[in-house]
Image (cartoon, rainbow, N blue to C red):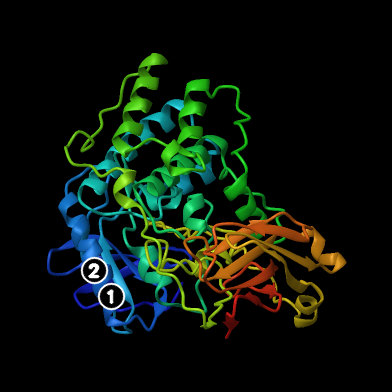
Amino acid sequence: MQPIEEALGYRVLDQAGQGGFAVVYRAYQERLDRQVALKVLSVDKVDQGTLRRFQRELQLTGRLTGHPNVVTVFDTGTTRAGRPYIAMEFFEGGSLRDRLSREGPLPVADVLRAGVKLAGALSAVHQAGVLHGDIKPQNILISKYGEPAIADFGVARVVDMAEVSAAAHAFTPLHAAPEVLRGQPHSVSSDLYSLGSTLYHLLAGQPAFHNPADPSIAPLMLRVLSRPPPPFSRRDVPPAVSEAIMRVLAKQPEERYGTAREFAQRLQAIQIELGLPATDMVGGDLPGEPSREHTTMPRPPAAPRSRLRLHLVVGMAVAGLAGAGIGVALFVSAQDDPVTARPTATAVPSGEADAVDPAAVKALTPRNLKIAADNGASITLRWTLPANAKRFPLVLQREPADGQQTTVLDQGSTSTRVFGLKPDSGYCFVLGVPLSIGEKSTTAWSRPTCIRGAVAN
């Protein structure tokens, strides 16, 4: 058990769970004489601006109080040690991930029922002007009545904008939409993708693109960005169910369902087609739900033709998994952040790799990155790879990003075309081989190369 965090007005009874971003305690709220789940985030040095934004996001979810499929947040604040906490409903049933661990893949009827309820809840969330940003099985808690409820609004934002403590396990974007991995902000459509990915996980028993044999996070990124989800191996998954989930997992947002309500209605129609009772959708029939068209990302202004800073962190375009920088979302551990509120703690493997030998990093570093051709709106890059590096996918980063800072390349490739450049702007490029998985990730970066007068810092 971790050292107990003290929060004014709460008395910790026991530790209920521990995950990558938080420790969850079963606590007694003295003022209102009730048990709550006290979730203390494992981050240090949270600045006041970040904390205010975090609390504001949770305040917005207060509009959803009483929704049976959204966890009610009672209170937020900071512990005596300065760490943010959330006091919320206590769910003895654990999470959907806990159920998967106990039972394996879930019955189709149960997944459809949960899908309708969660899509309806997500519709209500969007109507309230909130984007979740981190839908996944461990963020879906189960009430004592068997009802699924979405939890952890705003947690990814505050964690990613703060310094993750050394004791915390990091997480990986197994359920993040492709556009989020490319550095674009979260949207209605990316929340829908994550919900679809969660339903896939419930049916398949693992996330669509997960492979425990991956030597680094880069193969996962490559599959998410460029390959279709594997078909379900279960024979009892009807084609209509598979088609609905595959649509919401489309690479391009415009190819998915337009709203959570639309997705829920399709799942209800499938239930009827299969002779199952149609599940009621609470909160999905209210007017005013935003669609993906209302969440497009403005293009950043062109960078001056001067010194350009290459951050050497994939996906710095947005923070957190919710809006302004996603660096930690890409090169971290192979396990999701298991957040539960249970009477007993669940063992969680960290998925962290051993420290990478600096000599090994140097031996795998791409060399001789050069501009082979400059055609204004596009360029051709070439490089050489050490022999051992050819089994790793590559990541190419450019600055200014112009909306697409990072590109994942096939393993062993030695050239690529880069499109969408401004002919009158300077750019710098750097090529990396992602190596380690862990809280502190390691990438073997080449020396930067620049064009048109740009200079890398």
Which residue is more in the foreground, 212 or 227? 227
Q: How many marks?
A: 2
Residue annotated with mark 1: 51
Q: Which residue is at 47% across, 26% downward?
A: 241
Give the structural element (helix, strand or loop) at label 2. Answer: helix
Estimate the x, y position of residue 6 in percent, counting from the top left: 30, 79
Residue 392, x across and y down, in percent:
75, 60
The local secondary structure at tag 1 comes to helix
Asked if residue 216 lies left or right of residue 229, the reply is: right
Find residue 55 and name its label. Answer: 2
**Viewer-proximal residue among 1 and 394:** 394
**Is mark 1 in CB contact (under 8 Å) with mark 2?**
yes
**Spatial separation of the CA atoms under disc 1 and disc 2:** 6 Å
Label 2, residues with CA under 10 Å away: few <14, some 14-19, many ≥20 = many
Report the residue at 60% width, 39% height from top: 228
Tell me the kind of residue under disc 2. Gln
Residue 218 percent coordinates (x, y)? 65, 59
The answer to whether residue 87 of the structure is visible from this angle is: yes
Q: Which residue sits at x=32%, y=51%?
A: 295
Dot 1 amino acid type: Leu
Q: Judge the density around disc 1: few (<14), some (14-19), many (≥20) Cα neighbours within 10 Å.
A: many
Residue 14 image position (x, y, % from top left) = 36, 67
